[in-house]
Amino acid sequence: MMKKSEIKLIKSYLRRFFEGPLFTKQKWAAFWRYAREACTLVYEKIAGLDYSMVYWTKDESIHHSVYTKVPDKVLKRIFTDINNIKDKGFLDVGCGKCYAVTRAAQNGFRLYGGVEYTKQLYDIGRKNLKKKKLSTEHVYHTDAKDFEHYGEFDVFFFNNPFDETIMEPVAEKIYTSHVGRECVLYFLNPHLKPRTEAIEKAGFKLVKKISDRAEWYFNINVYTNMEKLYRQQDNEMENNYEK
């Protein structure tokens, strides 16, 4: 059975959908996405999983964002952009219910993990991974500012988990833990300038924008600490695709 809080959230999303003009490209893209998510939610309820339901995190910290499951199309674009995926470690910073962590594991990363501040989300995420028979060893319940294992990973994903007051020290920690070796940071929904500025202030360079023509809030900014190396690898991947 669905909780009252879950029903309330669904109603709020429906209200948002019907606000303003209905017959726009953005609205139709959202409509079909919501329809797919509704089917997925039914499957999850049957399978004992919980990835899809939105979770309000601001009760835990005013600096945190609402949890929403990242769409598969976003993760596919990110994974396609990564060279030699089997040699890389993937970390979802603000991993929530561990959907991106699950998909990273299923896509063959050498190492996969996540960091989550909210205990309830952390517990749900670990439960989801166990249901999928995946390791929870590198999923941590801690403040991202205090996390000490960034150096073990190469690829970092941010589904807009917190504001710039958290982003700046986190980005600095990632940057300083990768002196002399490459790391890449994928930032979803990069439309809040103070947050992207915090990433660049830490030393990262914006090297690519992966756009979504249908829904602008699924755009992705790609940052790296080694711009020249990233562009070289990116060109090599493009040449391989052309062949």
Image (cartoon, rainbow, N blue to C red):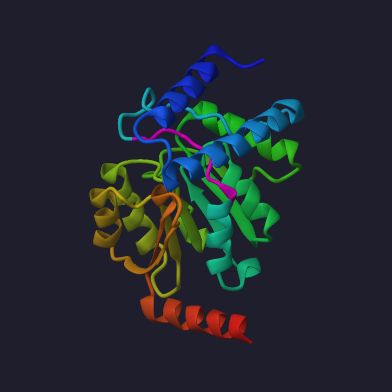
* Residue 42 rendering spot, x and y as whole percentages: 69, 28
Q: Is residue 1 above or below residue 63?
A: above
* Residue 23 seen: yes
Direction front: furthest residue:
23
- Residue name at image x 64 percent, y 45 percent: 137
- Residue name at image x 58 percent, y 66 percent: 80
Magenta residues, as a range? 64-72
Frontmost residue, 41 versus 108: 41
* Residue 57 seen: no
Direction top: furthest residue:
4
| The N terminus: image quadrant | top right
Frontmost residue, 22 versus 137: 22
| The C terminus: image quadrant | bottom right
Q: Is residue 137 above or below residue 90?
A: above
* Residue 27 rendering spot, x and y as whole percentages: 44, 40
- For the stretch drawn in magenta, the main secondary structure is loop
Q: Is residue 169 above or below residue 35?
A: below
* Residue 201 rendering spot, x and y as whole percentages: 24, 60
- Residue name at image x 60 percent, y 43 percent: 99
The quadrant holding residue 166 is top left
Q: How many marks?
A: 0
- Taking the magenta stretch, the answer to whether it contains residue 69 is yes
- Taking the magenta stretch, the answer to whether it contains residue 242 is no
- Residue name at image x 36 percent, y 29 percent: 19
Frontmost residue, 191 versus 123: 191
* Residue 121 rendering spot, x and y as whole percentages: 53, 31
Question: Position of 204 compared to 80: left or right?
Answer: left
Q: Is residue 36 above or below residue 84?
A: above
Question: Position of 54 compared to 145: left or right?
Answer: right
Question: Position of 198 compared to 64: left or right?
Answer: left
